Image (cartoon, rainbow, N blue to C red):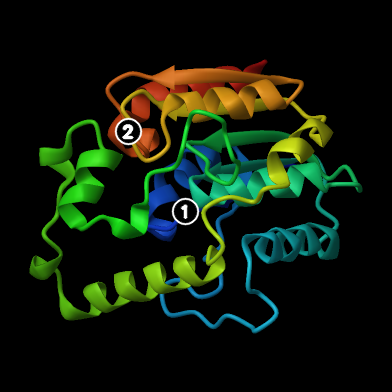
Amino acid sequence: MTSSTSRPALVLHGGGGPFTVASLANHLTGMNFDVTAPTHPGWNGTARAESISTVADLATLYLDYLAEHDLRDVLVVGSSLGGWIGADMAARDTDHRISALVLIDAVGIEAPGAPIRDFFGLDARGVAEYAWHDSERYYVDPTTLPAAQQAAQRGNMATMASLTANGMIDPTLLGRLAQIAVPTLVIWGESDRIVTPAYGAAFADAIADARLTIIDEAGHLPHLEQPESTFAALDAFLAA
């Protein structure tokens, strides 16, 4: 249980679902953050209102959540698609509720010379090859999973495809990143071939108070593949 004086943190998952950021939420809880790690509407079988049809709509949903609960001094941490949501939130945070931002292998911008891999065109083996440093260790044959888990994964991918029907980018976001006025840590896996480290550099270059940290021997989810290095970078950022 966190104390009433705990600093709030919002941890936002990517296309893989909430389990992909559970370790981040647990780590921050151990640092006495009051962590909210929501399941995005449409993931894991949850309902998605017709009003939520884009990633920007998710950002609005979570900005409204911060306002409704009068949360301030909020740390926002986003992985992959969650990083896109977090960056959009921070760029539109006119109430100044967000005080720090962490983007982990985020998507959402159009970075010259750093195109996003066509994730939806990859099979499970291809995803492992492009998303992980050690693909053999992390590859899972989807046909070996329980039927319910296979169905959940298909549902999650269908939701993500619907929300990103116009592509894995918001053409306006890169230009709006200059509006982010809070300290920002951009964490990137060295071996990410879904969105390469050049993409991370584009995020960091566009945000005034941002630093880029590359995690060796890690791919698209460095907090899962190299947790010690990732958490060390996160802890140093928060201490500063």
Q: Residue 31's x, y, as percent?
A: 56, 34
Q: Residue 216's x, y, as percent?
A: 33, 18
Q: In the rendered structure, are the residues bearing label 2 and label 1 in contact, judged by CB atoms less than 8 Å apart?
A: no
- Which mark identifies residue 219? 2
How many discs mark residues in the rendered view?
A: 2
- Residue toward you, 116 or 68: 116
User: Residue at 35% across / 32% down in the picture?
Assistant: 192
Q: Residue 85's x, y, as percent?
A: 63, 52
Res. 87 in view: yes
- For this view, does 227 lie left or right of residue 94? left
Check the image and report above or below for 69 versus 195: below
- For this view, does 42 lie left or right of residue 172? left
Residue placed under numbered mark 1 in the picture: 14
Q: Secondary structure at mark 1?
A: loop
Q: Secondary structure at mark 2?
A: loop
User: In 3D space, how far apart are the residues under numbered discs 2 and 1 (Cα atoms)?
Assistant: 14 Å
Among the 4 quarters of the image, the one containing residue 154: bottom left
Q: Quadrant of the C terminus?
A: top right
- Residue toward you, 163 or 233: 163
Return the disc, 2 or 1, that comes first in the chain's sequence. 1
Amino acid type shown at disc 2: Gly
Check the image and report above or below for 60 versus 31: below
Among the 4 quarters of the image, the one containing residue 143: bottom left
User: Residue at 30% across / 58% down in the picture?
Assistant: 121
Residue closest to the far front? 113
Res. 1 in view: no
Amino acid type shown at disc 1: Gly
